[in-house]
């Protein structure tokens, strides 16, 4: 294929693609190859979302979204209304309350850190006689009503609180696993549509950290024709032995579009759930520093096991103390890898990322969701939150992603947040941590426009390197190519 009349900045050029790679740049002579006239549109490397939970994102639009709720009471009212509508549409005789059932009603997206009230059983019990599960926006907490507590056999242990129905971290992840019961063929169909929607945003690849064994799922989907994305799959502690027994190593090619990724381990929680592990107390919560969910010795042990088998570690660390512990573990093990989120980092730890060869994988759109929560619970310290500029200036490799479904799978939103540090008409939040559009795009891609590079490309109606944050967030994509094959755009 030949792409004609493309632009990169002010430079106009043609581009020839041969066997999926860029074979010629400049004025390409006329041939019998297929050609696509870009008519002066801009060309950029195809985008990667470096951190997603893909199956959960594919299911998100099929569940009730309560992200707009500003209180527990309002969340319960949204659930009540949705349950009544579902009951009425099914022809039930008592539309005011759904009949008891074993299948839970699921809502997603609640963020209670700034609510005037707290999640409680009374509000959610009033919403339905059947089980209800409300998943937090950060995925680190779930709020259950009494029938759901019984349905999932929740007991007093760990972070479970039967008096409120609120479960955090390990107990929450168990519930998330139990409610993801969509049949494979149905979920695969949703995944295919979701992959096509990502391609329409200019996405050519994802790093999938779905909390499941993903090798069979993605092999099955791609064999059935889901070919819009390159996929790199991660594994968790419960699947590490299986990956090692199969001889899987980071970077291994598992299919035309499928590769083995990293071993991911979570060592703390999140800001909105107030479980991110910090050096200082959460404001207004004496003695509360968050949760360290994996001991330092255990972390080193499992990272050593993964690294020795050729599987690079990715450590989930949000709080500043968790980031220190993660960097300490990388230094002890002596391997490279990634820290996922790196949301709050001690100043002394910034240069350690580059020195240890540890990439910082951040989600800038989370800063727009979390800014008020951070100001409340980390007062006077938020200049170290989402420290993109500081990390780059310290020589770190920075990767950008969405953590979908926590934020939408749309790299343009991440790029816009990284460049502007603002959204929804608000003033920029810590603009000193903003980075340039070229830096943000480089952190959202894995190739360049150069000879021999993969022809993973996005064609846009505006120059992404010269656009404002608002223009970046709504960037109109004309076409997306994966290995020179159109996955979105004109035939």
Image (spheres, helix red, strand yellow):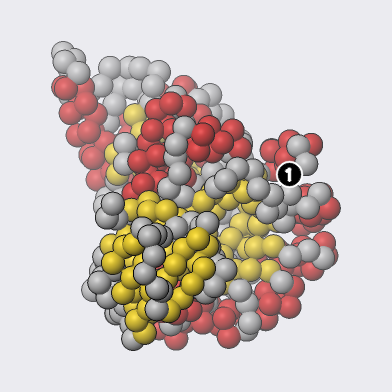
Residue shown at 47%/27% (left/top)? 184
Judge whether 281 appears above or below 64 on screen.
Answer: below
State the residue in front, 337 or 76. 337
Judge whether 363 appears above or below 112 on screen.
Answer: below
State the residue in front, 200 or 171. 200
* Residue 32 pos. (x, y %): 38, 60
Disc count in the image?
A: 1
Judge whether 166 appears above or below 418 on screen.
Answer: above
Residue shown at 69%/38% (left/top)? 239
Residue shown at 73%/44% (left/top)? 248
Q: Secondary structure at mark 1?
A: loop
Judge whether 23 appears above or below 488 on screen.
Answer: below
Give the quarter of the image for residue 225: top left
| Horizontal side, residue 486 vs residue 321: left or right | left
State the residue in front, 372 or 239. 239
Evaluate whether residue 429 shows in this view: no
| Horizontal side, residue 9 vs residue 285: left or right | left
Evaluate whether residue 99 shows in this view: yes
Q: Which residue is mark 1?
A: 248
* Residue 185 pos. (x, y %): 43, 26
| Number of other residues with Cα within 10 Å of mark 1, as a class: few under 14, some 14 to 19, many 20 or more | some
Looking at the rendered image, the quarter that the N terminus falls into is: bottom left
Residue shown at 51%/51% (left/top)? 230
State the residue in front, 364 or 250. 250
* Residue 15 pos. (x, y %): 42, 71
Give the quarter of the image for residue 353: bottom right
* Residue 300 pos. (x, y %): 80, 56
Give the quarter of the image for residue 347: bottom right
């Amino acid at each position: 294929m030949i792409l004609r009349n493309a632009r990169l900045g002010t430079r106009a050029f043609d581009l020839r693609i041969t066997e999926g790679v860029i074979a010629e740049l400049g004025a390409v002579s006329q041939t019998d190859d297929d050609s696509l006239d870009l008519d002066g549109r801009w060309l950029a490397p195809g985008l990667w979302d470096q951190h997603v939970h893909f199956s959960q994102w594919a299911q998100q639009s099929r569940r009730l979204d309560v992200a707009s709720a500003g209180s527990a009471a309002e969340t319960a009212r949204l659930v009540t209304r949705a349950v009544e509508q579902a009951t009425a549409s099914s022809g039930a005789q008592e539309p005011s309350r759904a009949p008891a059932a074993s299948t839970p009603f699921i809502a997603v997206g609640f963020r209670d850190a700034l609510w005037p009230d707290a999640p409680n059983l009374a509000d959610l019990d009033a919403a339905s006689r059947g089980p209800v599960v409300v998943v937090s926006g950060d995925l680190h907490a779930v709020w259950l009503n009494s029938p759901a507590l019984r349905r999932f056999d929740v007991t007093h242990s760990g972070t479970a609180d039967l008096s409120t129905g609120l479960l955090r971290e390990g107990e929450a992840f168990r519930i998330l696993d139990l409610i993801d019961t969509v049949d494979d063929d149905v979920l695969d169909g949703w995944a295919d549509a979701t992959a096509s929607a990502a391609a329409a945003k200019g996405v050519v690849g994802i790093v999938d950290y779905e909390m499941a064994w993903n090798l069979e799922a993605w092999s099955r989907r791609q064999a059935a024709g889901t070919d819009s994305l390159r996929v790199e799959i991660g594994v968790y502690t419960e699947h590490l032995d299986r990956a090692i027994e199969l001889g899987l190593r980071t970077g291994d090619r598992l299919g035309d579009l499928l590769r083995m990724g990293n071993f991911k381990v979570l060592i703390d929680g999140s800001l909105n759930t107030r479980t991110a592990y910090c050096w200082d107390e959460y404001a207004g919560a004496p003695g509360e520093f968050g949760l360290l969910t994996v001991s330092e010795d255990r972390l080193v042990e499992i990272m050593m096991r993964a690294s020795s088998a050729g599987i690079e570690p990715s450590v989930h660390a949000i709080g500043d103390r968790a980031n220190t512990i993660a960097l300490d573990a990388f230094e002890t093990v002596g391997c490279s890898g990634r820290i996922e989120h790196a949301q709050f980092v001690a100043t002394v730890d910034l240069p350690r990322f580059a020195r240890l060869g540890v990439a910082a994988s951040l989600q800038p759109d989370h800063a727009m969701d979390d800014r008020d929560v951070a100001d409340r619970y980390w007062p006077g310290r938020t200049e170290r939150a989402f420290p993109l500029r500081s990390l780059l200036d310290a020589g770190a490799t920075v990767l950008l992603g969405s953590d979908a479904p926590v934020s939408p799978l749309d790299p343009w939103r991440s790029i816009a947040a990284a460049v502007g540090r603002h959204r929804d008409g608000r003033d920029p939040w810590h603009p000193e941590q903003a980075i340039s559009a070229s830096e943000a795009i480089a952190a959202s891609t894995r190739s360049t426009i150069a000879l021999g590079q993969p022809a993973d490309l996005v064609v846009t109606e505006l120059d992404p390197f010269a656009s404002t944050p608002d223009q970046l967030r709504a960037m109109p994509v004309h076409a997306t190519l994966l290995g020179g094959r159109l996955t979105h755009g004109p035939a």
